[in-house]
Amino acid sequence: MQFPLHPAVVHFPIALITAALIFHTLHLCRPEWINGSIGLWLLGLSTIFSIVAVLSGQKEIQKAGELGYPTETLILIERHQTIGNIVVWGSILLFIGWLFLYLKNQVNNKINHLAFAFLLLLFVIVIISGYTGGHLVYIHGVGTP
């Protein structure tokens, strides 16, 4: 039996985006306590894990398609896949934009607040993705033996 990678990897983007939001919020509230780039690098690390999670999720979708789940479950799988894609592309775009401004030394208070807003939005989307994934596993039994 092959080890399913998706359930093992999906927790990293959730945790890293949450940590990025927490550390960036801490930097906005108390800039002297913490370096302002920690949120950026945590977001970059979560982007890598998000890509791996989506790629491994594609393999799990193929397995689920072979098992013949009901239409309701397949619709929820498609919704979970769409939300996951939004997380990946949102992470990539936010990380590249923020990194570009960071490397050009153009990060200021307005950019930090804008990054906070996008991190918060990304966090909410990740929570929704995690909820739908949990619903698939615990209610519909997707990915369980």
Image (cartoon, grey):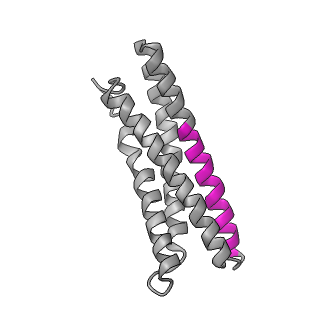
Q: Residue at x 47, y 82 (%)?
A: 30
Query: The C terminus is located in which quarter?
Result: top left
Residue 76 x, y percent position in the rendering? 48, 26
Is 86 a magenta residue?
A: yes
In depth, the one of 92 and 110 nearer the eye is 110
Q: Is residue 93 left or right of residue 29?
A: right
Residue 93 x, y percent position in the rendering? 66, 54
Q: Is residue 145 above or below residue 40?
A: above
Q: Is residue 24 above or below residue 137?
A: below
Name, please, the residue furthest toward the bottom.
32
What range is drawn magenta here?
83-103
Q: Residue at x 53, y 58 (%)?
A: 120
Considering the whole magenta stretch, tell me its main secondary structure.
helix
Q: Is residue 115 left or right of residue 26?
A: right
Query: The N terminus is located in which quarter?
Result: top left
Q: Residue at x 35, y 27 (%)?
A: 143
Is 47 a magenta residue?
A: no
Q: How many marks?
A: 0
Q: Is residue 92 left or right of residue 78?
A: right
Name, please, the residue furthest toward the left.
145
| Residue 107 falls in image quadrant | bottom right
Residue 25 x, y percent position in the rendering? 49, 71
Q: Is residue 131 above or below residue 96?
A: above
Residue 122 x, y percent position in the rendering? 54, 53
